[in-house]
């Protein structure tokens, strides 16, 4: 796994833990921050994954028949 993947996993875990902390102590601001971090981490992963897949197709040599 690359450093980017590890950073995204850390953001997902942090978001999940903040959500649990906010829910346990009835602190809405921390809970919502955790939700937004979690959703942002998933969105970032999907964007980077799609970008890498599109770059692979661009870099592939064209085959002429």
Image (tube, rainbow, N blue to C red):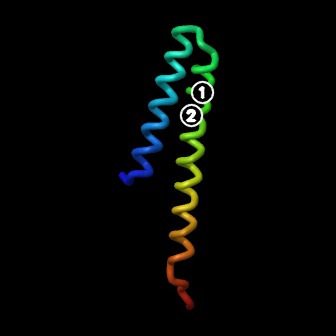
At horizontal 56% and vertical 49% (from top left) the residue drawn is 46
Q: Where residue 6 appears, x then y in whole percent?
A: 40, 45
Q: Residue furthest bottom?
A: 65
58 in relation to 48, above or below:
below
Q: Which quadrant does the C terminus fall into?
A: bottom right
- The foreground one among 6 and 27 is 27
Q: Where residue 3 appears, x then y in whole percent?
A: 39, 51
Q: Secondary structure at mark 1?
A: helix
Q: Is residue 22 left or right of residue 9?
A: right
For label 2, the crowd category at 10 Å Cα-Cα, with few meaning under 14, some 14 to 19 and many 20 or more, is: many
46 in relation to 19, above or below:
below
Tags 2 and 1 touching, CB below 8 Å: yes
Per the rendering, the mark at residue 37 is: 2
Q: Secondary structure at mark 2?
A: helix
Residue 22, located in which quarter of the rendered image? top right
10 in relation to 56, above or below:
above
Q: Residue furthest top?
A: 25
At horizontal 56% and vertical 75% (from top left) the residue drawn is 58
Q: Where residue 53 appears, x then y in whole percent?
A: 53, 63
CA–CA distance in space, label 2 to label 1: 6 Å
Per the rendering, the mark at residue 33 is: 1
At horizontal 44% and vertical 40% (from top left) the residue drawn is 9
Q: Where residue 51 appears, x then y in whole percent?
A: 57, 61
Q: How many marks?
A: 2
């Amino acid at each position: 796994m690359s450093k980017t993947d590890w950073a995204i996993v850390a953001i997902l875990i942090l978001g999940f833990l903040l959500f649990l902390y906010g829910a346990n102590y009835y602190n809405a601001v921390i809970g919502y921050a955790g939700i937004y971090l979690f959703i942002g981490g998933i969105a970032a992963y999907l964007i980077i994954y799609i970008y890498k897949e599109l770059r692979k197709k661009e870099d592939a040599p064209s085959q002429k028949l």
